[in-house]
Image (cartoon, rainbow, N blue to C red):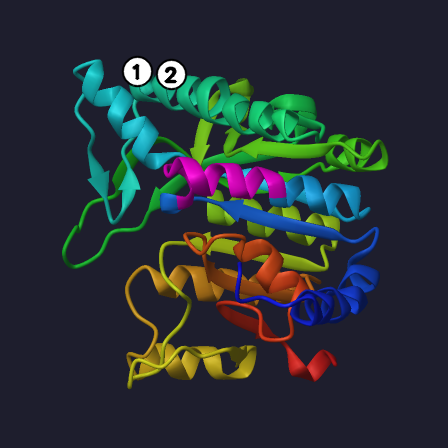
């Protein structure tokens, strides 16, 4: 910090001012996952950043994952982790562990950390107040897997009732949502956190959706980070292989969020300290910002 002058600090604050004004009383949905949920310093920085948003009268809504924590607990209990196409096969016993870890461990840890830094937060699952109505996810047969794959208690979002989130926002309390929904008969279903964040952002008509990952964003074929990406270019980048693997569902989910009314979506590296603040309050931002210029 010794190399930073008073003038430099003043310029940082001056640059941030219009963004604070723009996002005041707006909803920012953050999908929190990856290594940022494991590293202690990053977890503390994330909580402090949320409290800063809250103090600035911005409404953050957190949707978190917890795959590594679930895997660790299953291993400790002697329960085998099985996957298909990157999705956890979740029988009744595994679902009990998933819900215990997401709702009872990860969620409460995030809420407590926000509280220690002076903020107010409430932990939720999709089963609370009818937040996430879900249906069982069915994987269609393919040439590689000609039979229907039963993933067990894995779901997809059918409907979002954001009343409880809106109530918390009005009270300036940060909602922290674990991606467990309720299916037919009230049965718990494990849902992909990216999908939950996307659907919640659409329902809330969020100003921004920030997807925190372990990579910087979308890169072109030369390896350069794409700072801005329009929805009209997405399918072309998938077709030519620029966007591939696990980035495909993230980018397509971003497009769906934008078409659902979210203003901008950013895929960003959560391992960058204070990535949220850098994305929201600086001119350059971080990661890949995806938008629909036809709506501008």
Magenta stretch holds residue 154:
no
Q: Position of residue 66 (x, y in %)?
A: 39, 34
Secondary structure of the magenta portion, mostly? helix
Estimate the spatial distance between the alpha carbons at disc 1 and disc 2, rounded to whole Å: 5 Å
Name the residue nearer the viewer: 103 or 258.
103
- Say the numbered circle drawn on residue 93: 1
Name the residue nearer the viewer: 7 or 132.
7
Name the residue nearer the viewer: 200 or 171.
171
Is 7 situated left or right of 234 in this image?
right
Q: Start and end of the magenta stretch? A: 36-48
Q: Position of residue 166 (x, y in %)?
A: 79, 37
Could you say whether the residue bearing mark 1 is in a helix, strand or loop?
helix
Is 266 situated left or right of 174 in this image?
left
Q: Are marks 1 and 2 in contact (CB under 8 Å)?
A: yes
Crowd around label 1: few <14 · some 14–19 · many ≥20 (10 Å): few
49 vs 9: above or below: above
Could you say whether the residue bearing mark 2 is in a helix, strand or loop?
helix
Q: Position of residue 154 (x, y in %)?
A: 39, 34
Residue 173 falls in which quadrant of the image?
top right
Report if residue 175 is visible in the image.
Answer: yes
Question: Which residue appears at 42% of the width and 67% of the height?
Answer: 217
Is 38 situated left or right of 195 in this image?
left
The residue at which mark 2 appears reads as 96
């Amino acid at each position: 910090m010794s190399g930073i002058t008073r003038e430099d600090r003043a310029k940082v604050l001056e640059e941030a001012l219009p963004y604070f004004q723009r996002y005041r009383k707006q909803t920012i949905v953050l999908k929190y996952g990856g290594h940022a949920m494991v590293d202690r310093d990053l977890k503390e920085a994330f909580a402090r950043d949320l409290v800063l948003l809250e103090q600035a009268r911005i409404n953050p809504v957190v949707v978190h994952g917890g795959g590594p924590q679930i895997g660790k607990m299953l291993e400790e209990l002697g329960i085998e982790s099985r996957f298909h196409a990157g999705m956890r096969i979740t029988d009744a016993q595994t679902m009990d562990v998933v819900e215990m870890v997401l709702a009872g461990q990860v969620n409460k840890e995030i809420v407590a950390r926000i509280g220690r830094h002076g903020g107010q937060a409430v932990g939720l699952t999709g089963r609370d107040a009818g937040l996430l109505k879900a249906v069982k996810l069915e994987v269609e047969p393919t040439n590689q897997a000609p039979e229907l794959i039963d993933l067990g208690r894995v779901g997809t979002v059918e409907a979002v009732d954001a009343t409880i989130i809106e109530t918390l926002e009005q009270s300036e309390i940060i909602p922290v949502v674990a991606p467990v929904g309720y299916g037919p008969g009230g049965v718990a279903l494990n849902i992909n956190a990216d999908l939950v964040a996307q659907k919640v952002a659409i329902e809330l008509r969020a100003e921004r959706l920030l997807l925190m990952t372990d990579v910087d964003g979308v890169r072109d074929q030369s390896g350069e980070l794409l700072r801005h990406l329009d929805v009209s270019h997405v399918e072309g980048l998938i077709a030519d292989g620029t966007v591939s693997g696990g980035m495909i569902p993230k980018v397509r989910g971003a497009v769906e969020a934008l078409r659902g009314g979210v203003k901008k979506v950013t895929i960003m590296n959560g391992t960058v300290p204070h990535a949220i603040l850098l994305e929201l309050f600086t001119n350059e931002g971080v990661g890949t910002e995806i938008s629909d210029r036809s709506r501008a």
